[in-house]
Image (cartoon, coloured by chain):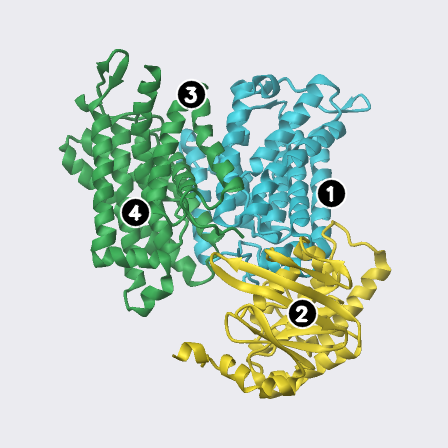
Chain colours: A yellow, B green, C cyan
Amino acid sequence: MTEVLLKSENLARAFGGVQAVAGVSLSLPAGQVTALVGPNGAGKTTTFNLITGNLRADSGTAHVRGKPVMGLKPWQVARLGVARSFQDLRLFTHMTVRENVLAATETAAWFWQPGGARARATREDRAVTALEATGLSALADARAVDLAYAERKFLSMARVLAADADIWLLDEPASGLDLSSRLRFGELLRAATARGVAICLIEHNLDVVAELSDRIAFLDQGRVLAEGDPQSILRDPALAAIYFGDRPQEAA
Amino acid sequence: MLFLQLLLNGLQVGAIYALTAAGFALIFGATKIFHVAHGTAFTIAGYVFLFAWRAGWPGWAGAAAAVLAAMAFGVAMERYVYRPIQRHEGSFFTVFVAAFGVGIVVQNVIGMIAGRGFATVDTPLSFSAEILPDVFVAPMLWISLATAAVLFIALTVFLTRHPAGVGLRALSQNPDLVRTYGLSSNGLSVLAFAIGSALAAPAAIVTVMTTGLNEAIGHQVMLISIAATIVGGIGSLRGAALAGMMLGIAESLALQFVDTQWAEAVSFLVLFGFIIFRPSGIFGVVQTR
Amino acid sequence: MTAFLLNLATLAAISGILASTLNFIVGYAGIFSVAHAVFFGLGAYGGAQVALLLVPDPFLACFVAALIAGGLSLCLALPALRVRGEYFVAASLGLQMVAATLFAELKPLTGGIGGLVGIPRPEIFGTVVPVLPLALAALALILFLTARLQRGAFGRTLQSIRDADSAAEALGKNVNAAKTLAVAFACAGAGVAGALYALHLSFINVESFTLDQSIQIMAMVIIGGTGTLWGPLVGAIMLLSLPAVLSFIPFIPPTEVGAVQQIIYGLAMTLLMIFRPAGLVGDQTKGRSTS
């Protein structure tokens, strides 16, 4: 069994009367891609937000490499090695592609960055590597707002890549990508898992899920209904029924 | 008795604040434009009434001219300043600076034409009479309160009954919705500016007839409108009007404890406190960050 | 004539500091403060009191001014951490109004409406020195620092917060600390400008620290171009030389020069926002700060 880098237990959060997340326990092992699958409103993004400290959980715990992260601020969670992407990307629109990626390598908010010239060189190397891996090197001086759709998605990935984290939480990173972009995206993930990165991705397209993931956690109504290898989960007719919206109890 | 006197003064100031703040809130709600030149509409209306009065026009004609002038100014702002800005980039700050520039221009043009300093019209309506021992009230107080009340009822009826009013409310809740249903949101935004600016006119007329106004009063009116809108909760017309009334009363009652020059600071202290501790205002939904 | 030009140059340098520091938070951090004159005033009163009560040492005055303005900048940082956009502008307006009242009323510290008079000329090692070289040195230092900060990691951090604060936070940036630091830096700079202003004029009162002044500084930044290094300086020089230029135009009566000047810069603000929102110096193709 490989090392579990991120582990959540019984995470729960209600909004008003709606139980958005109702006790999600999730483990992300190093070197594996875990897909978070489920119908709209199942609580996938909310789970991310609870782990990263963007939302406060009503109950439950989460640990990053054994360190509790509940109650930490998002930037503190990030510095433990958790990088995330957003469904709406949230690029730094008026900065250039290179600046976007460089910004991801710099964490401290002070007037200066710690580590001096050597650390800076390392950061710049990381930025260059991230740009190459995402195929954005030629666009380094373009502004994020001027990029095409797929390029924006890759820029959001480049930021995650440059952040040098070993836990990636990706919110619909592959949606809307054409086949060739998706292949390159798959390579990115493979290269990362080979280095031992634990990846969790939210994805709606089940073909993409089958193609990219090593494990699937199936979420519905704020609960993990099933967890396991892609083949068994994707073939389960009960889950498919829920996923495609004909819930037996509601059909009546 | 001082308390009662201050309270009554506060009601009059509050009625003026409530009217201007409601106009500002209506415009902001329906168009999402932070119309900082709202105080300028107030100034223009006030001076139009002043000049009409001095030219010997009857009061109602002056008032009508003032309302029309305020509406024309509001619509012109929408047409020639806000819409072109929103067509290209239109960050809220661009809008803010442009409107502020207009405010500065109008203030100085009026200063050059009408002279600087306070101007007022004297009518029998603004002479105070002693209604209780040591409590003086001018008929203007009742007139301004009645005006404010009537206008609010009219506005509420318009916003709930008339299709265009319903459209305005829909626009403030969800701009996309209106577009889907084919109501012209351009037309509605002109309407919002016309009505919102018109609401500043009665307040300006009352001000001319009581405390008087100067060319720089627009600043203060704008600031109070913003304060009331935020304290009341952005998006809530009733909240803005109520907060305007409360700020007016608070300023006046504060005089019991502090000197006049502090009175205005009271409103801004309240505003500052609200922004830090309850940015959603009294009636608003939380929408920070 | 020389005296006139020297005075103008000194005021231009001081305004340049104000405009550059305001530009730092407006253009890079997206913190749209209309309370910059408050910190200018705090520095002026602080610097003046140092000169009046202790020694007319310009460095000490500037240091104390920076300390006071930078410390009290928390009053501006606090709303900047809580709210953004219109709300923040409203909060800074509120701060400006309350501060102007305090300046006018706290007579023991500020001299009230009458202000502080007879501020001694600055002395270095017992020799009286003019303020101009000091102001130019301070301006150069501030420009150098802002240029360094803007190009470096801190500038990127601020810009990333301006464009998408939640994403910046998700990348490990302590958003609150960065905003607080940026505001403190800008306000401390305004404080230094205030101390120099007090030493230069040897008289200050609340008139120089009101909303009008804040708007004028804002106009300098906007007209020159937000988010550029030289734009604010260009804007400062233009707005300051405007009254001088106007006084040479014969048909404007001297009593109206002030009003005409205000009309011109009001018009400039409006027309620029409609037709050239990046300012005179700003690159029109590059996007403006949004919020």
Task: For the residues labelled 2 and 3, say whether their Cβ atoms are less than 8 Å apart.
Answer: no
Residue located at (56% from left, 59% from top) = A13
Mark 2 residue crowding within 10 angstroms, few (<14) / some (14–19) / many (20+): many
The mark closer to the camera, 2 or 3, is 2
Task: For the residues labelled 1 and 3, say whether their Cβ atoms are less than 8 Å apart.
Answer: no
Residue located at (50% from left, 79% from top) = A242
Q: Identify the subunit bearing mark 2.
A: A
Q: Provide the secondary structure element on which disc 2 rests.
A: strand
The mark closer to the camera, 4 or 2, is 2
Q: Provide the secondary structure element on which disc 4 rests.
A: helix
Provide the residue designation for mark 2: A26
Provide the residue designation for mark 3: B260
Q: Is residue C215 above or below residue A94?
A: above
Residues under labels 1 and 2: Cα distance? 53 Å
- Residue B20: horizontal and vertical position, in percent? 32, 40
Residues under labels 4 and 2: Cα distance? 53 Å
Q: Is residue B157 visible?
A: yes
Residues under labels 2 and 3: Cα distance? 63 Å
The mark closer to the camera, 1 or 2, is 2
Amino acid under disc 3: Thr
- Residue B208: horizontal and vertical position, in percent? 27, 29
Provide the residue designation for mark 1: C141
Q: Provide the secondary structure element on which disc 1 rests.
A: helix
Callouts 4 and 3 on one subunit: yes
The mark closer to the camera, 4 or 1, is 4
Residue reaching furthest to the left: B58
Q: Is residue B199 above or below residue C195?
A: below
Q: Identify the subunit bearing mark 1.
A: C
The mark closer to the camera, 1 or 3, is 3
